[in-house]
Image: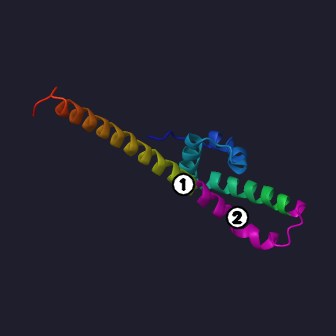
Amino acid sequence: MSRTMDCREAQNCITPFIAGTLSDADLEAYLAHLDTCPSCLEDLSVHYTVELGLKLLSENDPDAEENLPHAFDQALARARRHLARRHRLRYIRAALVIGGLVLAAAGLVWYAVSSGLLVL
């Protein structure tokens, strides 16, 4: 179960979110908070847009005007996809471990039966 986050904690996640340095657990809690708190979502949107706008201006990006409007929504979508991939990998890893254990157990049973240690 993921932890919950209040607005004060969410404010402390703005800079790490923009920098891409939030841990998966913090990112999950932060996104869950943003889903229920329009005020924190707006704060992140403003910070993200200002920071990205300044970066694009400093790079003299001719497409800055076109890239800026949807950049925040794209960043949120990327973060959600990242978490979804991490969750899928966790399930795949667990399935591989279970599959390996089943194969090892089957191998032991086969060995015990073929060597006469176990009679079925």
What is the quadrant of residue 101 in the picture?
Answer: top left
- What is the three-letter code of the residue carrying label 1? Asp
Which marked residue is nearer to the observer: mark 1 or mark 2? 2
What is the quadrant of residue 9 in the picture?
Answer: top right
Residue sitting farthest toward the left: 120
Residue 71: mark in rendering: 2
Residue span colored magenta = 57-79
Which residue: 70% across, 64% down?
71
Q: Residues within 10 Å of mark 1 (few under 14, many from 20)?
A: few
Viewer-proximal residue among 68 and 59: 59
Viewer-proximal residue among 30 and 113: 113
Residue sitting farthest toward the front: 115
What x and y, as percent, mark residue 17?
Answer: 68, 48
Which element carries disc 2, helix, strand or loop? helix
- What is the three-letter code of the residue carrying label 2? Ala
- The question of residue 8 being in magenta is answered with no
Describe residue 118's horizontal placement relative to residue 94 as left or right: left
Q: Is residue 64 above or below residue 58?
A: below
What is the quadrant of residue 51 in the picture?
Answer: bottom right
Which residue: 64% across, 51% down?
40
Which residue: 39% across, 44% down?
96
Q: Is residue 33 above or below residue 49?
A: above
Quadrant containing the N terminus is: top left
- The question of residue 76 being in magenta is answered with yes
**Mark 1 lies on residue:** 35
Viewer-proximal residue among 6 and 60: 60
